[in-house]
Image (cartoon, coloured by chain):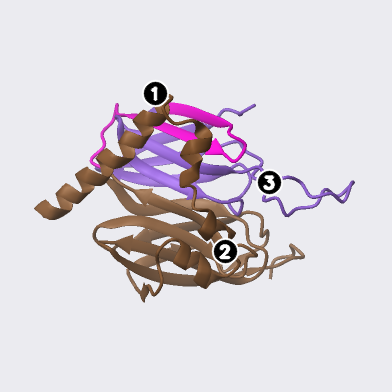
Amino acid sequence: MAQPMRIRATMAGDVADVKVLMNHPMETGTRKDAKTGQLVPAHFIQEITATVNGVAVLNANIGGAVSKNPYLGFKVKGAKAGDKVVVNWADNKGDKNTEEATIS
Amino acid sequence: MNALRRNVLKSAAGASAVAVAVAAGLLKPTQAMAAWNKTAFEAKNVVDAMKGIGATNPADSKDIIIKAPDIAENGAVVPVEVTSRIAGTSSIAILAEKNAQPMIGEFNLSGGAEGFISTRIKMGQTSLVRAVVSAGGKTYTAAKEVKVTIGGCGG
């Protein structure tokens, strides 16, 4: 089950500073389980999309080399307080999650 | 100015069309994920990985600033921040040169997103962290070395 993610979006001048913290194990598929010696199957977020008031601002493809519980920060010019930020992700197992926040 | 505006609008419309298609259930997640750049992510060296994202011979640029620690005590969590001052930056890719699979992520920006990405990456060993920026159909690059200490005693 997808764990909730956290979004914080604040205005700094005329630029919105968006910080997203996702909950995900981000297994690369090359790590071995210490007990069994078996490879831990790959399980990582592949795609992240973000929109501000319905306008796409970010479309990211990431691999297993992004740290566990990925953090992502980006900045959007021209956004204003009260705008709605929506972040979606999808992983290699078809799991996905979405979360929204309001810029303050 | 107008040409840039058009491009920005066009790419924003294209990206949101995909989002709408996903939301409407037209595209199943598995199909949507076909867009994931397998070639680039599974490449075993930097040159192939850069080729995979269409950056065959990026020009060195001083307008790309990579903020990362000089010494990372924990290779599993290395904070990296990339700022591109190049006008019209449309995507930022991050690579760790000596990782078994150097490609870490490609971030496509649109709709007013600034040339800035901040994230945390995994690094297998001391290596250059490379950023590849694409702007106006051209690619630019910059790199910064990050030392990874295995013992975790710092240095």
Identify the residue at horizontal 84%, vertical 49% (top origin).
A38
Q: Which chain is purple?
A: A
How many C-alpha atoms fall within 10 Å of the one at disc 3: few (<14), some, or many (≥20)?
some
B46 relative position to B138: left or right: right
Residue A104 lies, with reference to residue B97, above or below; the image says above
Q: Residue at x 37, y 72 (%)?
A: B58
- Residue at 37% in and 30% down: B21
Spot the brown chain and give its letter: B
Q: Amino acid at mark 2?
A: Ala
Residue B6's label in the rendered image is: none
**Which of pointers 1 and 3 indicates the residue nearer the eye?**
1
Label placed on residue B24: 1
Task: Give the chain of mark 2.
Answer: B
| Quarter of the view holding residue B42 | bottom right
Nearer the observer, B17 or A49: B17
Residue A42: assigned label = 3
